[in-house]
Image: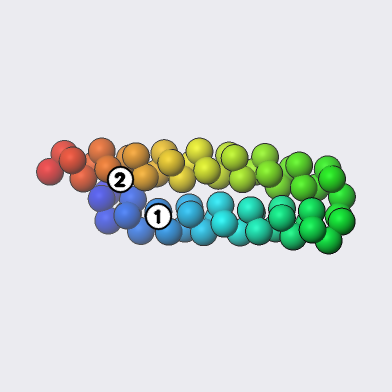
Amino acid sequence: MNVFLHSLIPFALAAVGVVLMLGLWNMLRGGSPNRSQLLMRWRVILQFVAICVVMAAIYVASLK
């Protein structure tokens, strides 16, 4: 379980980064404000997931 969580952390962080860059790119090129808003909402959700994964990895690591 510990190895799984530790390998999941980079993917969660990468997902946050990708959605952040897509949202910023959309805003900078003058795209739809609704799309930017949707991407920023997804960023917040993915940040929550990433924080939960990191906290779970820390918890599992502390059990040993």
Task: Measuring from the top left, give residue 22's x and y in whole percent.
Answer: 70, 58
Viewer-proximal residue among 60 and 30 = 30
Q: Tell me residue 15's x, y (percent).
A: 55, 55
Q: Specify whether 6 is left or right of 31.
A: left
* Secondary element type, mark 1: helix
Residue 19, compared with residue 56, is above or below; it is below
Residue 55 in the image: state x and y as whole percent.
Answer: 34, 39
Within the image, what quadrant is residue 45 found in? top right
Circles 1 and 2: CB distance less than 8 Å? yes
**Where is mark 2, residue-wise?**
57
Residue at left offset 79%, top offset 53%? 27
Residue 8: assigned label: 1
User: Is the residue marked by circle 2 packed among few (<14), some (14-19), or many (20+) residues within 10 Å?
Assistant: many
Q: Amino acid at mark 2?
A: Ala
Whichever of callouts 1 and 2 sits on the residue coming sooner in the sequence is: 1
Residue 58 pos. (x, y %) = 27, 43
- For this view, does 13 lie left or right of residue 7? right
Identity of the residue furthest to the left in this view: 64
Task: Using the image, determine if residue 53 lies above or below residue 19.
Answer: above
Q: Residues within 10 Å of mark 1 (few under 14, many from 20)?
A: some
Tell me where residue 52 sits by quadrant.
top left
Q: How is the image coloured?
A: rainbow
* Residue at (48% x, 54% y) in the render: 13
Please indicate whether residue 63 sits to the left or right of residue 27 in the image: left
